[in-house]
Amino acid sequence: MFVLLRELQRLRRQIGLRPPGRSGSLAVRHVDAGSCNGCEHELGACFGPHYDAGRFGLSVAASPRHADALLVSGTVTTRMASPLRTAYESMPEPRWVIALGDCALGLTFLGDETELAGPVETLLPVDVFIPGCPPQPEAIAKGLLEAMDQSRGAKLGRRRLHL
Amino acid sequence: MSVPGSAIQLVPADQWRSTCEGLVDEGGRFLALYAVRENEDVAVRAAFDGPQGPTLISCTTESGVAESIVPVIPAAGWDEREAHDAYGVDFEGHRPLRALLAHPDDLSEWVVPVHGHDPYQVAVGPIHAGVIESGHFRFRVVGESILHVDLRLFYKHRGLERAAEGRPLSTGIAFAQRACAACAVSNSVAYAQAVESLQGYRPSPRLARVRTLLLELERLYNHLNDIGAACAGIGFAPGNMAFSALKERVHRLNQALSGHRFLFETIAVSRSPATIDRAAAAEARAEVETIAEDARRAWREVLFNASVQDRFLGVGRLSLDDALRLGTVGPAARASGLRRDARSDAPGLEYPGFEPASLRHSDGDVAARVNLRALEVDATVALLHELLARPAVPLAEPSAEAALEIAPGRAGIGVVESPRGETVCVLEAAEGLLTRMHLRTGSYANWPSLAHAAAGNLLPDFPLINKSFELCYSCSDR
């Protein structure tokens, strides 16, 4: 195990990740509403050793009740529309919605009409869009930070509430 | 080969089961079963692999009723349930025929009843706690032990097969590719092979080489990911992080070689859109070597860590008999001692003298499945070493005009070993347009085996057992 830890330390030095240079935090709940698993892999990589989104105060919350933002990937299938709404309704306010990937944005619409409820925007108010198929880890981190900035603005009373 | 593709052999409805049984008795292996609409009727088709290549048989249902083949081929269980839900076929002898694709509200319509002293239910999903795909598991538990688990997938069902119908054969590949990012190359190659078989096009050695290279790159990042995932399954963060880092390096290698981290759009029908030059191949070869070296070092740390092995050994056991019966494929099947890998007989790809990986102790537990992947990483690295050394410059191939006349009553079948196991694509077409596409991935084949292996284990070990199979939801849901 110590060999692994030493290697990881060496890797971190090699990559030379810059210090975040900012403060704040954003807890994200991810919902796969019908993606091809690409966005999930890249989101995982975003929190992996090469990108370490955690150093910006970003984290993945296990429950929507503990989340500031809902991160939705995939064109929403008819079967996932209701669990997605339930997750959104379970969140404390104020809350943010981030659409992750081209499918969630409605840029690709691959599938049978009867099985798809539509892009995330047609079901929930989306605050941040992260395009890409799948979006690369840097792009995901940037999108999440944008949501974090929005949430800061909200603390100063500049944010509408979605009820 | 006079007429391209496989003939769809018609079988009388009352001989459906006996014909399927006969094919298996002659050494055939069940590949897939699906339904298709024919004029006013619904027909059921089953594909088998045999010494003479794939066979496809069909029977027209009598007012929607067909004989079930599950009593003789249990591996077709999910296939029949899906055909029932999507095409309304009633399978005589498959009782109860529980809902799979359909999501009825009534629990009794899709779960196996459990009786006894004090069993209780644990419902998990469709939204999971981590960054995981969506799907629902219904556990029946006594104390900490799993008595039985029912899987309710298809939350991510996008109707890709139906959406592909009516599309030209060359563009339908998008539906196979987007079924799953992590198996994009495998699914696309299976699709491309099915079309090429239908059109009578034989891939050139050069095309075979590029596809083999891309398939192995896909396997490399998936296997590294899966070993890391198993470490995550027991909360061994250093192992998870080490293998995530290795996986990331393969993604970057893929990006440098093909322009996409997941190798999207590198496979097309009868040609190769991927262009890989000598210099890039040489660099990639050196990088694969260093990744392999680091992977071996990290793997030793996992393998000789007593507390890790203590959690892996003896958990989630799948016996060889069960693997054979349930039609388990891929690393999971090989970890149970089944020496079967679609790469050992892969026309159209370049695997000379390929031997399936096998363990000294094929115990079929989590340890065996993880160990087997580590073995396969070595094999894949050796293959890549060879493939990248002679990159038959340039690795791209000009578009070839294949015969576009498709003989009626024939189908194309493509079989590819994906990182999760054998993936089968069956295509039917008329006048150059798809009339039916069926994709049965390694994940789809293995979900029932996972449920079977989980029974009798501790509920908290389920995430670990799940990760040792590491099946895709999107590949199965389509």
Image (tube, helix red, strand yellow):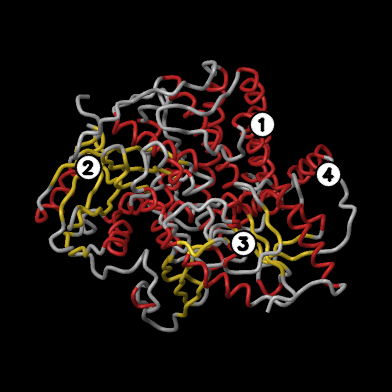
At which x and y percent is residue B196?
A: 34, 31
The amino acid beneath tag 2 is Leu
Q: Secondary structure at mark 2?
A: strand
Q: Which residue is mark 3?
A: A72
Query: Relative to B157, does residue A139 appear above or below in the rendering?
Result: above
Chain at numbered mark 4: A
Q: CA distance from mark 3 to mark 4?
A: 27 Å
Residue B40 lies left or right of residue B330; in this view the side is: left
Q: Nearer the viewer, residue B328 or B146?
A: B328
The amino acid beneath tag 4 is Leu
**Crowd class of label 4 (few under 14; some 14 to 19; many from 20; radius 10 Å):** few
The amino acid beneath tag 1 is Glu
Residue B189 lies left or right of residue A7; in this view the side is: left
Q: CA distance from mark 4 to mark 1?
A: 24 Å
Q: Which residue is mark 4?
A: A17
State which tag comes first along the sequence, 1 or 2.
2
Q: Nearer the viewer, residue A47 or B161?
A: B161
Q: CA distance from mark 1 to mark 2?
A: 44 Å
Whether marks 3 and 2 lie on the same chain = no
Q: Which residue is mark 1?
A: B293
**Crowd class of label 3 (few under 14; some 14 to 19; many from 20; radius 10 Å):** many
Chain at numbered mark 3: A
Residue at the spot 62% in from the left edge and 33% down from the top edge: B259
Image disc number at residue B186: none
Q: CA distance from mark 3 to mark 1?
A: 37 Å
